Amino acid sequence: MKRISFTGLGITLPMLAISLISYGQTTKTGLGVSNNISSAESSASKTKVSTLDRSDVRSKAVREFVRSYKNVSNEKWYNTQDGFIAMFILDDINYRVDYDKKGIWLHTIRTYNENKLPSDVRHLVKSSYYDYNIIVVQEIEIPWEPFMDFPTDLFTYIVHLEGKTKLINLRVSNGEMDEWEKFDKSK
């Protein structure tokens, strides 16, 4: 069961690794982190991603998107080698919704600040890392499969922490937390 849930993460975690490395570098240099869609667009343009109109996206993906996000109409669609990506902002949360070439939903990544983090996850993190600030959170949601434990296997949180001398990226899933990456801050 855990192997299957982490297989889905095996797809999304490499994508996050690039953003985590850039996050660590921007924090070290004092530039700050940009969580807006335009920065995602510029990084996406480097990986052979093209912008699409909603009418050019596979109809199954659009139907799933409209069903899941009824109040969203300002999304931007992108075509990738592996499928389609919809990006938008709703209630101060940046969304990235990925679909495969057939229009099947693969996962959703939400990026937000500490105040949007579920209280149980926040408590788990802050009880062990009370001297660290939560800079940004990436919440990864994967589709439910009949062989998965419901609902805890559906969400994984990547919590970016900043301390006086360290940057730590935590992975929180199923009530368990582990240090995924750790960096020394430059002096």
Image (cartoon, rainbow, N blue to C red):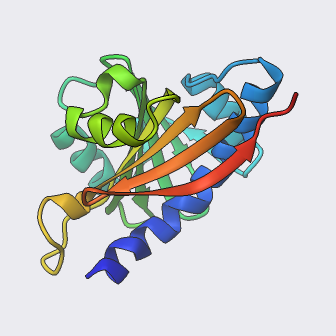
Q: Is residue 101 left or right of residue 48?
A: left
Q: Position of residue 8 (x, y in %)?
A: 40, 69
Task: Tell me if 60 is positioned left or right of 16 in this view.
Answer: left
For image coordinates 18% across by 74% down, the residue present is 148
In this view, the residue in front, 177 or 31, is 177
- The one nearer the camera, 146 or 97, is 146
Give above or below for 91 relative to 52.
above
Q: Indicate the quadrant containing the C terminus: top left, top right, bottom left or bottom right.
A: top right
- Residue 149 in percent (x, y) is at 14, 71
Q: Hey, which quadrant is residue 26 in on the image?
A: top right
In this picture, is 17 found above or below 96? below
Give me the residue at 40% from left, 73% from top.
Answer: 6
Give the residue at x 31% y 34%: 122
Q: Is residue 75 visible?
A: no
Instruction: Name the residue nearer the viewer: 124 or 181.
Output: 124
Quadrant for residue 112, please give it: top left
Residue 18 against residue 27 in the figure, above or below: below
Horizontal and vertical percent position of residue 16: 58, 51
Q: How many marks?
A: 0
Q: Residue at x 30, y 25 (%)?
A: 116
- The quadrant of the rendering that contains the N terminus is bottom left
Task: Point out residue 171 in the picture as x, y percentages from the top left corner.
Answer: 45, 54
Q: Residue 50, can we see it? A: yes
